Image (cartoon, coloured by chain):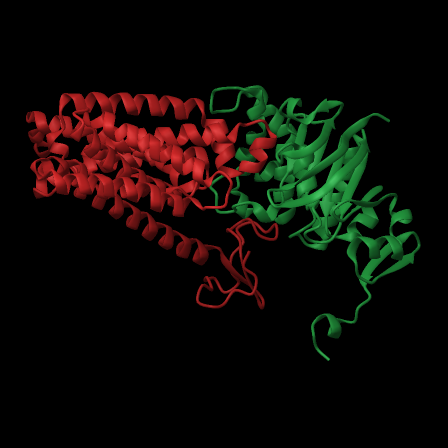
Chain colours: A green, B red
Amino acid sequence: MSSAVYLSNVTAGYAHNVVFTRLSLEIGAGRFAGIVGPTGCGKTTLLKTILGTHPVFSGSVLLNGQPVDSVPPGAIGYVPQLGSVDWSFPVTVEEVIMMGLYTNRRIWPWASKEERERIHDLAHRLGIYDCLQHHIVHTSGGQRQRAFLARALINNPKLLVLDEPTSGVDIKTQHEVLHLLGDINNDGITILLTTHDLNAVASHLPWVICFNHGIVAQGKPRDIFTNEILTRTYGGDLVIVRHEGHYLIANNTPLHLTSGLS
Amino acid sequence: MEFLLEPLEYEFFRHGLLAALMVGSLCGVIGVYVILRGMSYVGHGLSHAAFGGAVVGFTLNFNFYAGAGAMGLLAALLINRITRNGKIKSDAAIGIVTTAMFALGVIIISRVRTFTQSFEAALFGNILGITGEDLLVIGLVTASTMTAMFFMYRPLLFSTFDNEAARVFGIRTGIVQLIFSMLLTLSIIASMNVVGVTMIAATLIAPAVTARMMTDSFSRMLIYSTIMGAITGVAGMYLSYILNAASGATIVLFGALLFCLSLLIKFIREKFMLRVNLHRHGDLIHTHPHGQGHGVPNDRPENGKTNADQPAQENR
């Protein structure tokens, strides 16, 4: 399996704060992987490093065998965290998807016939054709996620990166989105996402990377979701319940202790 | 009809009308990006920096526009540089850079009192004193800014909406921001003699926020804002002639009036839509347009009237 993402001895961080040092990571082409870890563990910095929007102090980042700064625009699809989106911004779903077509280098503001057909085909495929003319704030959580997915997929990228796609949506939408990502992965697109939701990861993702300022462990959920690895990742006591191949992960600390009540 | 044609007999009015039309549409276009990029205060600040530059330029025997342009661009570059690492927010950078440049202009005026009168036009606008040179500058800035914004539509929209993702998609967001800051500076300098430093911010913002009330689409907002800016400029000019009031202030007040009207229309429209769409089905009160609920043709409230006065249990 060739590498879609290859990090070699990468050290990255901010002026007075090194987030991770000498990190090496390889994600094979066609893989569907999720990065999990506690808040502030460096997941977002890692994602930005992979996307090439965060400079590294040392080491190299290759995407599909090319240095990240020479990857052609559109080869990476990116879906930001929905919590960071300004929902009052005046854009329709169609205008959001059209933003992804910037990589065409077309200078006219309006979409060409071919571009419009691509938008409509993708919208049909993702089930958002009927809301193309809706303002983004007038769409459901699932439709919003699909609109941003469409923008990321409009250039047929080889690698799709998503920042917390399961946050801010209800549990049904979470499962719909992860199912949809599974279908996209079946088309041969490598998918890498970050999430806080261990249960969603356990149910849907074939590959998990436990991260806390470095890689704690990586592998299939059944190998990764052990008390020892999760304790090393999160530093707390987590309970793992296994039932007919499914996992449920919960905090083992009684609620009255975590909330400060006695 | 005569009241529209009569003022056109005067050259000063024709010049002023043309200047107001161009400045109105220019501010309408650029104002959309100004409010969506959260730069309303930048427009206000840059106009003050440009004023300081105009005074310095005048003292050094430069052209008014050369001094204002140089200082305005310097302010835009400094603000970009200071805020680049995110440690100092743009409002703080604008506060110190542009106010310092304005203060420089005020100090020079206070020391060299002989030309104080000349800068009243820049401070409060003097559209009736627009010269052929002013018209040429306004025309060139309007044409070049409109052209640049037309061809930069896609990267500008993407980086305004989602700067991080825009970078991933290959947009050089730093350069886009720099070019936009320069276009904004040029637009402000071109507008200075029309509406004045003290009122430029409203000219930039009013058409854009009015257009925002009218549509949820970005491309339509751009078109509406441009038209709204042009209408504001022309109507403001005529009103100032009829009322014998200061032109810049009349244009700004007319823009504010249009915004208030758009707010009122939006409020009434939402109230009306709520009354039309509220339905009662047994104990359940909810909203959907007639004929689009439950697959029942011509779906009507069971009691034949709307239930707007009652609290909605389900209100999507």
Residue A20's x, y, as percent? 72, 43
Residue A95 visible in the picture: yes
Quadrant location, the N terminus of chain B: top left
Q: What's the residue at 34%, 35% (across, down)?
A: B75
- The number of discs equals 0
Residue B43's quadrant in the figure?
top left
Furthest residue in direction bottom, as rendered: A262
Residue B14's quadrant in the figure?
top left
Q: What's the residue at 15%, 30% (across, down)?
A: B16
Furthest residue in direction right, as rendered: A244
Q: Nearer the viewer, residue B309 or B17?
A: B17
Residue B20 located left or right of residue A242: left
Residue B26 visible in the picture: no
Q: Nearer the viewer, residue B48 or B27?
A: B48
Residue A107's x, y, as percent? 48, 19
Quadrant location, the C terminus of chain B: bottom right
Residue B157 located left or right of residue B140: right
Q: What's the residue at 59%, 51% (across, down)?
A: B296
Q: Nearer the viewer, residue A12 or B119?
A: A12
When the figure is inspected, residue B124 is found, relative to residue A100, above or below; the finding is below
Residue B72's x, y, as percent? 30, 33
Residue B158's x, y, as percent? 52, 33
Q: What's the residue at 37%, 50% (across, down)?
A: B266
